[in-house]
Image: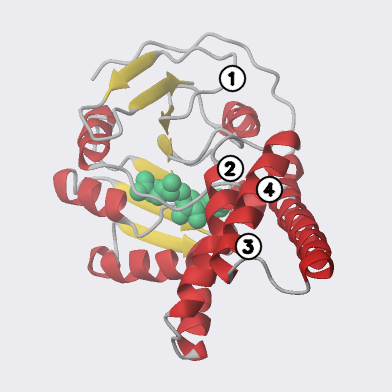
Amino acid sequence: MQIPSHNESAPRSGFPPASVGSMSPALTALRVQLLALLTVALIAAAASALTQEWVAGDFQWALLHGTLAALIGHRFGMAVWWLPIHLAFAPALVAALAFALPPLWFFGGFVLLALVYGKTCQTQVPFYLSSRAAARATALLLPEQPGFSFLDLGSGCGGLLHHLGKVRPDGNYHGVEVAPLPFLLGKCRNFFRAAGCRVSWGNFWDRDFAPYDVIYAYLSPVPMAALWRKAHAEMRPGSIFISNSFAVPGVTPDLSLELDDFEGSRLHVWRM
Ligand SMILES: C[S@@+](CC[C@H](N)C(=O)[O-])C[C@H]1O[C@@H](n2cnc3c(N)ncnc32)[C@H](O)[C@@H]1O
């Protein structure tokens, strides 16, 4: 597929990954939950003093907590998708306790989630997978000459690399993933393509982008501006930068491909 050249001249300065690793949304969420808890505790204490008995059951208190947390979260200017999380958190906690599961189950669930999403507070990029349609469209964007090198920034469980390696076995595929469990699954999945596919555990901000002909990112809106500065500073002229779904603020892509997938997502493509 022909991709026009990108002429925009962004500054080739360093990038600020520190600004991407901000803890603030997670800390704000914690503050919101604690503030709602404090308010509910005060209301419960006042109600108990007035009536000499609890006026509501655990689930009602949890619902009150959720409602207050959502309102406080809104007041604190949190992104709208945090509000249902605040609303549901305490009721879900009370509902889960009602099942009286052994504590080890909760511990196991916590460890599993930490191995997948533990770094999300820092990266502000959650784990989800590229669709089949995205993988097929990406395959069409690969260079025609064999021996090209491709890097998936945050390669998840390696599904995209696996697909590309099957349809274009003449390329060299690299993935870098920071979450331990998806990294291990990706490593195992691509183990038998040892020569053409390498998945490593680490942070893509530490990677030099210069050796790659194609770089693919499916991340979140948060790192896109800093990622563009890094890509623009390090990628070679003629190489291709692809972002699934998330645009670079203020930089028009050279090509935009609408995907026929469930999310109705779009591949944004720049030729450097
Ligand atoms: C939306 S998923 C995409 C997974 C895969 N690329 C795909 O398209 O199916 C984003 C992945 O990037 C990883 N990630 C986020 N920030 C990262 C970083 N700084 N270094 C390495 N991996 C990162 C996340 O752990 C997550 O698995």
**Picture colour scheme:** secondary structure
Q: Residues within 10 Å of mark 3 (few under 14, many from 20)?
A: many
Amino acid type at circle 3 is Trp
Q: Name the N-terminal-most of marks 3 and 1.
A: 3
Mark 3 vs mark 1, CA separation in Å: 42 Å
Quadrant holding the N terminus: top left
Q: Name the N-terminal-most of marks 4 and 3.
A: 3
The foreground one among 195 and 178 is: 178
Residue 213, how many percent across, how many down? 40, 35
Q: Residues within 10 Å of mark 1 (few under 14, many from 20)?
A: few
Q: Helix, strand, or loop for circle 4?
A: helix
Q: Mark number for residue 61?
A: 3
Mark 2 vs mark 4, CA separation in Å: 10 Å
Q: Mark number for residue 249?
A: 1
Q: Name the N-terminal-most of marks 1 and 2.
A: 2
Residue at the image point whose x is 46% and y is 91% from the top: 102
Question: Dots 4 and 3: beta carbons under 8 Å?
Answer: no
Q: Name the N-terminal-most of marks 1 and 4.
A: 4
Tag in front: 4 or 3: 3
Q: Read off the residue under disc 4.
A: 68
Q: Name the N-terminal-most of marks 2 and 4.
A: 4
Residue 7, how many percent across, how many down? 52, 8
Amino acid type at circle 2 is Leu
| 108 up-or-down from 29: above or below | below
Q: Read off the residue under disc 2.
A: 83
Q: Helix, strand, or loop for circle 1?
A: loop
